[in-house]
């Protein structure tokens, strides 16, 4: 189960690296199409999206730090996965339910695997 927890935690970290890239660098192109925004909407929100992307990068960095921290894996990964889950819940409530499935569910699965492995 520990291997499953490590893999799921790493996948959540990779997901947040992808979100960082999407929000910081691809907002006016790929993200605009993915979220159905006009060019004007994408331009008007690009700075906000880049800020969000940076926060997602911090979540990814925290998860990677947890993965390489040895004995401190469980408490560190738990903290950052809870942060991811909370952000996903907020996003689902304020933006769209899809965020629940993309962000919160993977974090919850990784948290469950961590608990089972401990």
Image (tube, rainbow, N blue to C red):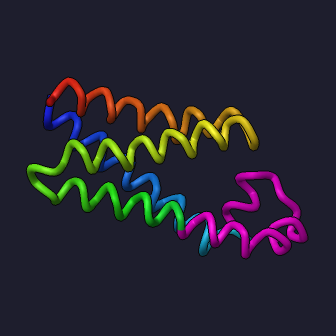
Where does residue 76 sit, x and y in percent of width and height? Answer: 27, 50
Q: Is residue 19 left or right of residue 72?
A: right
Q: Residue at x 83, y 58 (%)?
A: 37
Percent coordinates x, y for residue 97 in the rendering: 69, 32
Give the tally of numbered discs.
Answer: 0
Q: Is residue 59 magenta?
A: no
Does residue 4 appear to the left or right of 49 in the view shown? left
User: Which residue of the protein is positioned furthest toward the top in this rendering?
Assistant: 116
Identify the image quadrant of residue 58.
bottom left
Q: Nearer the viewer, residue 2 or 14?
A: 2
Image quadrant where one finds the N terminus: top left
Please, what is the dominant secondary structure of the magenta stretch? helix
Above/below status of 1 relative to 7: above
Q: Considering depth in this image, is 47 or 15 the residue closer to the camera?
A: 47
**Magenta part of the protein: which range?**
29-54
At 20% from the left and 24% from the top, the residue drawn is 116
Residue drawn 53% across the image and 64% down it? 55
Residue 71 percent coordinates (x, y): 9, 49
* Quadrant of the snapshot with the C terminus: top left
Q: Is residue 90 above or below residue 52?
A: above
Across and down, in percent, residue 38 comes to 88, 62
Q: Quadrant of residue 108?
A: top left
Residue 36 magenta-drawn? yes
Image height check: is 71 above or below 46? above
């Amino acid at each position: 189960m520990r291997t499953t927890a490590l893999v799921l935690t790493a996948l959540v970290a990779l997901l947040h690296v992808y979100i960082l890239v999407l929000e910081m660098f691809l907002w006016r192109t790929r993200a605009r199409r993915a979220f159905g925004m006009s060019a004007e909407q994408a331009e008007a929100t690009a700075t906000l999206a880049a800020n969000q992307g940076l926060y997602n990068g911090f979540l990814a960095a925290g998860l990677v730090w947890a993965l390489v921290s040895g004995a401190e894996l469980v408490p560190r990964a738990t903290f950052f996965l809870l942060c991811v889950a909370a952000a996903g819940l907020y996003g689902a409530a304020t933006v769209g339910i899809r965020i629940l499935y993309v962000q919160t569910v993977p974090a919850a699965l990784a948290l469950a695997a961590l608990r089972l492995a401990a």
